[in-house]
Each structure stands twice: as C-alpha cells, then as structure tokens.
Amino acid sequence: MANLELVKNSVIEGNVAGAAAETKACLESGMDPLEIINQGLVAGMNVVGPRFKAGEMFVPEVLMSAKAMHAGMELVKEKLVDFEMPSEGKVVIGTVKGDLHDIGKNLVAIMLESSGYDVVNLGVDIPPEKFAEAVKEHNPQVVGLSALLTTTMLAMKETIDYLKEEGLRDQVKVIIGGAPVTEDFSVEIGADGYAPDGGSAVELVKGLLA
Ligand code: B12
C-alpha cells in the first residue's frame, strides 16, 4: 500500500530500491508529487541531516540516503514535467578551485531542488572564471560556493573578487558553506550569507530572495 512514511524511512535507511518502489507506489496511487517530495523524500533527508550532525550517522550512510532520495526524485520528476512545478528562483552552485569535496555541496543542491529552486550544479574544482561564465549563461539569483579545506577557503574570496571585476557581483547573492567556513568569514570576504547545513541553506536562500 502506498505510504509516505515508507518513502521517508527508505530514505533514512539509505534503501535505494525501497525508496524507488515506495515512491512508485505513491505515484501510482495518485498522490500529489509535491506531497511525495515534501512529506516523503525531503522529510527523510530532514531526519538524516541532523542525525549526521549529531554523529549518529556517517558519511557513507548519508550518501546512501542521498542516493535513495535521488532514486525517488527521478521518478517524481517525470510526473512534474507536465505538473509544472513553480520555480522559486535559480541557484548556481559549485565547489571552489582546488577542492574536490562534493558530498555536502550536492546535499545542499538536493535540498534546494526539492524546495523548488532550479539548481545548476557546476561540480568540483571550479575556478572563478567558470563561476562568472555560469552567471552570464544562467542568470541565477544566487551563487553558492562550497569549500571543505582551509586552503581552498581563500578561493571563495577570489571568486567573489572576480565576480566584482567582471561587474557581475551586484546581480547575484553569494552564499558560502563547508565545514571550515564560518559566518564571520562570510562577512570578511564580502559574501551575502553563510549556512552550516542543507536545511539552513534553504532558509538562507529564501530569506535573501524574499
Ligand atoms: C569525504 C572526505 C573526503 C573525500 C571527498 C569525496 C567527495 N566526493 O566529496 C576525499 C577522500 C576525496 C577527500 C580528499 C581530501 N581530503 Co577530505 N574529507 C572528507 C570528510 C571525511 C567528509 C566531508 C564530507 O563529505 N562531509 C559530509 C558533508 C555532508 O558535510 P559538509 O561537506 O560539511 O557539508 C555540509 C555543510 O558544510 C554545508 N555546506 C557544504 N557546502 C556548502 C555550500 C553552501 C553554499 C552552503 C550554504 C552550505 C554548504 O551543508 C552541507 C550539508 O549539510 C572530511 C571530514 C569532515 N568531517 O568534514 C575530510 C576533510 C574535509 N578532508 C581533509 C583533507 C585534508 C583532505 C585531503 C587534502 C586529503 C589528502 N591528504 O589527500 C584531500 C583533498 C582533496 C581535494 N583537493 O579536495 C580535511 C580538511 C582539513 C582542513 N581543515 O583543511 C578534513 C576535515 C579531514 C581531516 N580532519 O583532516 N576527503
């Protein structure tokens, strides 16, 4: 029987096949795709985030949960094509130059996507020039920069400075995040905001675009 609780639990457990099967069952029962996203798939990730933060879940488990959520999301997305989900805005996100960590950045991207934002995920090791190109090409309201190394945090400042040089800084809000990054650092380098995790990133973007 179709049940959102089963979707949510499959995500929490990182059960990829289960998440897909339960999502499919919900869709076939005629459930609202947005309800499946918000009360099933995202609800599961909303449990995973804090558990990870509290040290009750580890990276491989978080990855499996993200994978499970994606599996469900792919199925729901097919339905959303003719459903026309209203876009809340566009976010370009990437991990800065020299940095290959992408787990957290991808989680932020997933959270934003599931909250209705269009997300252009540039990937890892993205130099300032590429961020600037993406701003020109995609015209986002928000640019998200991720860094997990104390050494690559400096590339965040370089990226913001480059956007200024190119005359693009004023047309976007720049938000930053990643384990070594702090609120103070975001102020210091002239970003518009910082968030410690995916859920807070969504709140931050909502606030900035309000
Ligand atoms: C997994 C991992 C790796 C994997 C990365 C795989 C991948 N595809 O991402 C691999 C093995 C490749 C790796 C490599 C290295 N790593 Co590493 N890695 C980690 C580890 C264990 C987990 C990071 C992670 O994914 N966390 C889980 C996610 C969910 O959390 P998160 O990234 O913090 O993201 C959340 C928030 O920060 C925030 N957030 C993240 N990005 C953004 C962006 C925006 C815009 C916003 C708003 C929010 C936001 O929201 C996210 C979701 O809640 C950390 C240790 C740690 N505890 O952080 C070390 C760690 C980051 N790595 C470290 C190091 C040193 C390295 C290497 C240099 C090791 C080496 N000698 O080769 C290389 C560097 C490679 C490179 N050039 O980038 C150090 C960094 C030390 C420092 N302070 O600089 C750490 C802290 C480990 C340690 N204690 O020494 N690493």
Image: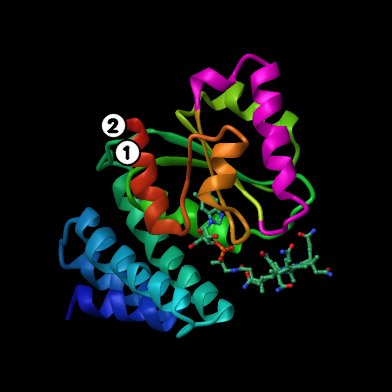
Amino acid type for the residue under numbered disc 1: Gly
Q: Using the image, tell me which numbered label, if any, was put on residue 187.
A: none
Q: Using the image, tell me which numbered label, if any, was put on residue 210.
A: 2
Q: Nearer the viewer, residue 141 or 152?
A: 152
The magenta span reads: 148-172
Provide the secondary structure element on which disc 1 rests: helix
Q: Is residue 166 magenta?
A: yes
Q: Which residue is mark 1?
A: 207
Residue for point 33% across, 43% down: 81
Observer able to see residue 16:
yes
Indicate left or right for 105 with 199 as reference: right
Q: How far across and how far down the image is residue 56, in percent?
A: 45, 85
Confirm or deny contact between disc 2 and disc 1 (CB under 8 A).
yes
Residue for point 50% across, 70% down: 67
Report which quarter residue 190 is drawn in: top right
Q: Nearer the viewer, residue 100 or 39?
A: 100
